[in-house]
Image (tube, rainbow, N blue to C red):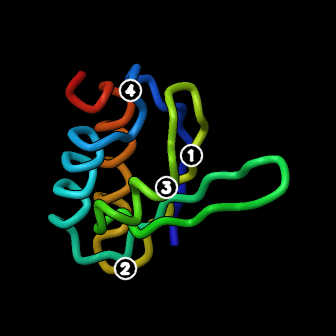
Amino acid sequence: MVSGKVVIKNPTGLHLRPAGLFCKTAMQYKSKITVHKELRHEEITANAKSVLSVLGACVKSGDEIEIICEGEDEAEALKAMLQLVMDGLGE
């Protein structure tokens, strides 16, 4: 298992179009990829390969998320997912 934290730069957060791109990228890997977001009173975990799960996490611009990858290609998956977010998710 590998993980990395990143701040969402996209002005709209992980809404429909960016979430679709995020999930499309995640689906290219065999590893299980999850998104973890901490709020004051709760923690939210979303399946990065499910658009509805990612949208349900309500990730906004400026939020810090942790991307967790588990599986045979976890290192490559984490690198790609972090880079996608750092690049602004196609803003």
Q: Nearer the viewer, mark 4 or mark 1?
A: 4
State the CA–CA distance, disc 3 to disc 2.
13 Å
- Whole-Å distance between the Cαs marked 4 and 2? 30 Å
Q: Residues within 10 Å of mark 1 (few under 14, many from 20)?
A: many
Closest to the camera, between mark 4 and mark 2, is 4
* Residue drawn where x is 33% and y is 63% of the image: 52
Q: Secondary structure at mark 4?
A: loop
Q: Which mark is residue 65?
A: 1
Label 2 neighbour load within 10 Å: few <14, some 14-19, many 20+: some
Mark 2 lies on residue? 71
What's the residue type where badge 2 is placed?
Gly
Q: Which mark is residue 24?
A: none
| Lower sequence index among marks 4 and 1 | 4
> Of callouts 1 and 2, which one flags the residue occurring earlier in the amino acid sequence?
1
Give the mark nearer the N terminus: 3 vs 4. Answer: 4
* Mark 1 vs mark 3, CA separation in Å: 6 Å
For the residue pair 71 and 47, the one nearer the viewer reads as 47
Which label lies toward us, 3 or 4? 4
Residue visible at 48% across and 31% down in the picture: 8
Mark 3 burial class by Cα count in 10 Å: few <14, some 14-19, many 20+:
many
The amino acid at mark 1 is: Ile
The residue tagged with tag 2: helix, strand or loop? loop
Residue contact at pointers 3 and 4, CB within 8 angstroms? no
Disc 4: which residue: 12
